[in-house]
Amino acid sequence: MSLLEYLVEDRNYSSGSVTLDSSSKDRRTPRTYELTLGGSSQSSRSYSHGQLSDCVDIGPLALKDKVATLRCETHYACRDSWVERFHRRLQKAEGEDSIYLISTSKQLDDFLDFYYSLPVPKPDEVFPFLHGLTNFVQRRFFLEDEDSKGLSANMTSPNHFYTMFVCTKDSQKVFPNSCSLDDILTPMPVEFDGQDHVEYIEYEPLDHVCRFSSSSSLFDNRNFASQQKIAASMSNFVVFNDSADFSVNLNAAKTLKKLSPDKSVYIVDIPLSDWVDSKSSHIIEKPVGLFVQEQSLLRQISSMKNPMKNIYSGNTLDYQILSDKPHTFYLIINAHDKAQFPDLSVLEKLMANNGHFKHIYLEFPCSGMFDSSSITFDQTLSFLNFLKLIYLCVSQDRKVLIFSQDGFTGQSLLLLAIGCLFKVDNGSGSLEEIILKLMSQNSSKFHFFKKDLVFLKKLERFIAWVKEYKLRDTCLISELNYESINSFYSKQVASFPQQTYDWFNFDSDNNFPSKISESIYVGSVSHASSFTVINNCELRTIISIGEKPLWLEELGIRLEHEPDFSPTTKSRVVKPAFVFNNGKSILYVISLPFMPQCPRLSEVIFVYNLKDDGKDSMLPLLLSAPQFLQDKIIPHPTYSGRTMIHCQFGVSRSVSLAIASFIKHKNLDLRGAYLLLRVTRYNVIAQPNLRLFYELFYYEYMLRRKTRSCWWSLCREIAQLNSKYLL
């Protein structure tokens, strides 16, 4: 389908229409088409057939993107004309030239309708500007200019009608992208009068964030914290508060006008009851912060699970709910970082009187607090007796709850130790097999620190010895005969077939990829290179972005762009399925031969030369790739075949594709999709670079012709959220 056919078929597409001028009967005369955008005759333009029919055999999103480009061509003239007419309808603040008063609900309605109907700028229109081109390092990299001559010139901001809503007082009713003055103002260095108090405060002009500085040399392609102020440098402003305090609003408007003299400032001078009722869809309750939402969603996802018989794992909210009502748990364990090993005398009393208490509450050190090189003899005894107490409770059909703050990180080490004691793998009970068994359970979520596994591996022989000899009574374990324990363990290891794994290396991170939905994992190239991980996750497809699995080199497969270093050896050549980024990036679909090491795996989708540098674009994969390829690279979260998406570390490029899947298939906005991805990949700070994140913002807009998020407000929230983990 050509773009023309698509537009004519959908005449009301994006509040516009297409009219065919068929007055010419001569086929040699180029026919023209009238594209009317936004329902306004002033935004009509004529386009030749060549302009509208150059997209063939591409998906509907690519066609929408083409229309968006045509819309932008008419947007500027239409925008400026509307703003001029709107200004003529408004009164001005007394003595102020460009401070306008929005004094009726109709004026506010019209302004909101206009503002929210404006197209979202395409990524190429705002990048690399949004990266912040304020020093030589940024400009040389993003502008690809090796010559420093002229690089210190100040940059010109993109020509888009941005509007920022500034709330001047604490208000319960706000606009979706509201901010405070403190969010966008930058104080100049203050002067003191010699008595240690501020004499006066002046603020930097709003465009200071775009000015060149020779004192900075930092490279940053994730400057989320700067987006609010960068947006303010090119924004008009709507000043408001829900108490309609005009004097406060006027002072704020004057400050903004002084710091950004070429922009317009509007004051909402309407009582709260009028402007709330006027456009309720554009006015919201003061939103809950992203951190609060993240913690709430995390508690929902990590709520109580039952990984082993009579063993339950939960979070602090689960415990709080239990404490307010009758429950059936006999032993409750709080794993946290301030806890000490239980005293041996306490454990001895509890084991001797097991079943005589209504409930038992104990505290235990959480994961990450164990060091095999410094643990004492008494602490080792405490750990082993603690495991014995848990075993005695479970063996008598009493329930045990282990909880921590997030519901999985804090108790992962203890749960793995319990798994070794119970031999949940029905095999040797080795730590590696226990991890594989527990990680394969759909309900289980674990995160272990490197030193936790080192500690457990050294303790493994003691746990096996306790399992064999010390669980038949209720007596305290008070002695450890190391020679006897080592002899027993050597015989036990020899009695089981030796398993080899290509994953467990206790000098490295041994966590598995994050399961973010029923059928999608997100991980690193290390995960994709491990047959142990691939088999345990039961993967059918691997999507490799920028980095491919190491074992792929051994299959006799050569990608077309790769040189043939062995012309005498026959190899299967895989041709590109899609080429983008001006021929630089290539997508390959590689059908795999049967491999006994991972019999379920059938396909690798490899995206060559897509870097996490803030310059390379992923948007062509989401918009312009043929539909059958989009179905592969944006997998459905509930498909039966399991897929792992990975890049080098599983932080940016792979995360971006996973977020795109949530936006498309779960009907989430970018904010919700990003939040869901963060909590399902909680122990890794998942953060696409700024350009990729903006492309997801634009992708949501292209899918739905609107976005439920505000770019700079979302970036501000993300920066605040990340700051809590980067202290």
Image (cartoon, rainbow, N blue to C red):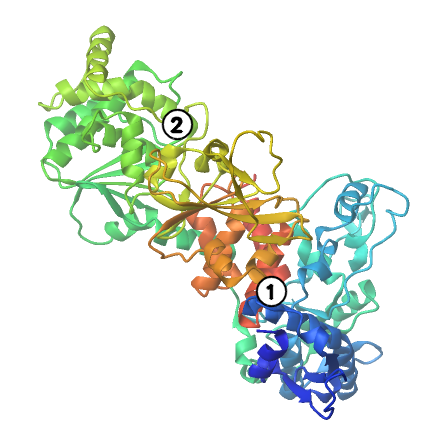
Taking the view exactly as shown, the residue that stands out farthest to the right is 149
Q: In this view, does 75 lie to the left or right of 535?
A: right
Residue type at mark 2?
A: Asp
User: Counting other residues with Cα less than 10 Å from the Cα at mark 2, is it few (<14), some (14-19), or many (20 or more)?
Assistant: few
- Location of residue 403 (image quadrant): top left
- Residue 270 in the image: above or below residue 193: below
Q: Residue 336 carries which label?
A: none
Asked whether the beta carbons under mark 1 and mark 2 sit within 8 Å of each other, the answer is no
Q: Which of marks 1 and 2 is nearer the N terminus?
A: 2
User: Counting other residues with Cα less than 10 Å from the Cα at mark 1, is it few (<14), some (14-19), or many (20 or more)?
Assistant: some
Which quadrant would the N terminus be assigned to in this image?
bottom right
Residue type at mark 1?
A: Cys
Where's residue 58, x and y in %? 57, 66
> Which residue carries the number 1 mark?
710
Taking the view exactly as shown, the residue that stands out farthest to the top is 483
Q: In this view, does 68 lie to the left or right of 546?
A: right
> Which residue carries the number 2 mark?
502
Which quadrant would the C terminus be assigned to in this image?
top right
Where's residue 315, x and y in %? 33, 46
